Image (cartoon, rainbow, N blue to C red):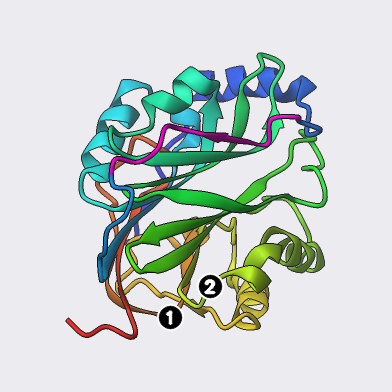
Amino acid sequence: MKRKLKPKRPILSVLKNFYQILAADSDISQKTWQSEHAHLQSGDSDLIRLLIWNIFKANSGQSLYDDLKVLTEQVDISILQEVLGLDAEFHSLNPEGWHSIHGAGYQRRDGRLDGVLTGSRWQQQVIGHNQAPKSDPLLKTRKASLATRVFCGDHAIDILNVHFPLIRTLRQAERDAKVLVGDLATLSHHAVVAGDFNTINRQYLAVIASVLEGFGLTHVTVPRDPRASYGQLDHIFVRGFMVKKIQVLSDVTSSDHFPIMCHLIRKDVSL
């Protein structure tokens, strides 16, 4: 099978973002933002449908928003990274009837916050927010993780949405993992850790997976993964779930990452 390369980055957008983060501030006061409550205050679902996607600050414009709308209509929980904006812009990413929470890593010179966002058809609450222990060496920005508890009827699912730094040693990657997933000790039995791990090779994945396995999480492999090996940066780890389906949507090219769709079933349920 021919592997697919990551979609190309629009150069002009990259340069504009670079200018904005030259004066980035990681000492931010607004660490989290929340939308209105979900319409589905409670409910129950044994099959949980997830979307994991680094949306690259919506640099592709309307095509990204169009793709995101189509994809979120097919899932129950969205786990997004590189979500950039102010309150009004975050609202535009929140489907009607969903509850979304943004966890910031840093603030740009134009005041917009960059971080991770978890959206859900069900009500959720913040149970943790962490920033990477060190800034990126060149840009002085920090990545973030956000832990939320999603209430699905009589049970809860804990979602840890992570974005790992890109430029670091293997030892630093291990330290980052321990900090960014530090809320795992308080997570419930049914837990998902997903996002952009920036695992540029198998060594980085092995180091991070070792930390997560210590918390009882299992890495979900993608059968016939269409991504080139160096482009396999986004992953999902689960605890208390069986994987019914996982797929990389390599035909969606409005970000520089391909989205991942994953369907999970709680282990105490048989369908």
Amino acid type assigned to the residue bearing label 2 in the image: Ser
Please tell me whether the stretch drawn in magenta is mainly helix, strand or loop.
loop
Front residue of this view, candidates 189 and 37 = 37
Q: Earlier in the sequence, mark 1 or mark 2?
A: 2
Q: Is residue 264 magenta?
A: no
Amino acid type assigned to the residue bearing label 1 in the image: Gly
Residue 65 picture quarter: top left
Cα separation, mark 1 vs mark 2, equals: 9 Å
Q: Which residue is mark 2?
A: 188
- Indicate which label's residue lies in the foreground, 1 or 2: 2
Q: Which residue is mark 1?
A: 240
SS under mark 1: loop
Locate residue 196 relative to residue 250 in the image: left or right: right
Percent position of residue 79, x then y: 44, 50
Percent position of residue 34, x then y: 51, 35
The magenta span reads 29-39
Pointers 1 and 2 in contact (CB under 8 A)? Answer: yes
